[in-house]
Image (cartoon, rainbow, N blue to C red):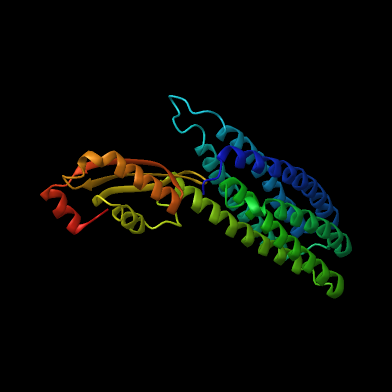
Amino acid sequence: MGLDLSVSSRSAEKRLWIALIISSVIAIIEFTGGFLGQSLALVSDSGHVLTDVLAVGVGILTLRLGRKPHTARRTFGYHRAEIFAALINGSVLIAAAFLIIFEAYLRLRQPPTVQGPLVLAIASIGLLGNLSSAGLLSQWRGSNLNVKGVFLHTVGDVLSSLAVIVSSLIVIFTGYLGIDPLAAAIIGVLIMRSAFVLVRDSTNILLEATPRQMQLETIAKTIRSVDGVKGVHDLHVWTITSGLYALSGHITVGTDSIGQGSTIAEKIEAKLKESFGIEHVTLQVEKETLENIQEHESSTI
């Protein structure tokens, strides 16, 4: 959790550049092959890959913005640019998924002739490229929300390429043309699923919700376990950007410990960083009073 955000950002950016090149080539090949082979599934897959290209481009931009220094006007720098990009990215994917599913419905009513062998060859090339991108980004998907978004897209691409391969084999061996729009609809559902996760996570961050992997009561108990702490209230934990968490709250200490308030706060900060990876901590130290005691008996948060 103590990962150097600047080093992580630069390493992630290098991988995103490689993923950008791979995705761009795949998108062009699949669209051309889908158009020539009359395959909606392959054209849909190329559209999904194209959204990956856009996602990677925005991801690279926001990683660079995130490395800009903080200013008096933007005290947290441009870290939230990553989250805005992830939200836009997921929203665009959901819209694209609806379009794919609608077009699949239209084609199911009147399926065109699909060139099975050509579609199979192109989809196989796409699968290899998508597997390369997924492997490239897999180890960094937990360190950055944009990288996670691109990784989810790539995993969706792998699954959709497999769906296209299966549908093309069915066309080759059975001649059933309806399988192509059915495969396209499946791809649309896969896209929507990954997009929902991305929109959910980015929205929670923008709403400053408690990080999903953290429990507020557990954090409160950890704070109360520090010697000298009598209680904790007005506790808030939120995510600034991927891997960067902040906490604010009030702690009460006994009258005999009020002079050690700074030392107690430092111990709490160290414990929160070690246990939860929370590095930005703001605590207000208060002297315990009868009112505090009554408040803490009813609620600690």
Q: Give the mark count.
A: 0
In depth, the one of 152 and 11 nearer the eye is 11
Question: Horizontal and vertical percent for residue 275?
Answer: 43, 54
Question: Horizontal and vertical percent for residue 4?
Answer: 56, 41
In depth, the one of 98 and 213 nearer the eye is 213
* Residue 274 seen: yes
Farthest residue to the bottom: give it. Answer: 174
Q: Is 207 situated left or right of 251 in this image?
A: right
- x 17%, y 45%: residue: 256
Q: Is 21 situated left or right of 4 in this image?
A: right
Question: Horizontal and vertical percent for residue 231?
Answer: 23, 52
The correct choice, above or below, for 178 with respect to 266 in the image is below
- x 49%, y 31%: residue: 77
Question: Horizontal and vertical percent for residue 255?
Answer: 16, 45
Farthest residue to the left: give it. Answer: 290
The image quadrant of residue 245 is top left
* Residue 38 seen: no
In depth, the one of 157 and 33 nearer the eye is 157
- x 75%, y 69%: residue: 179
- x 31%, y 57%: residue: 221
In depth, the one of 84 and 38 nearer the eye is 84
Farthest residue to the top: give it. Answer: 72
The image quadrant of residue 124 is bottom right
Farthest residue to the right: give it. Answer: 117
The correct choice, above or below, for 77 with respect to 291 in the image is above
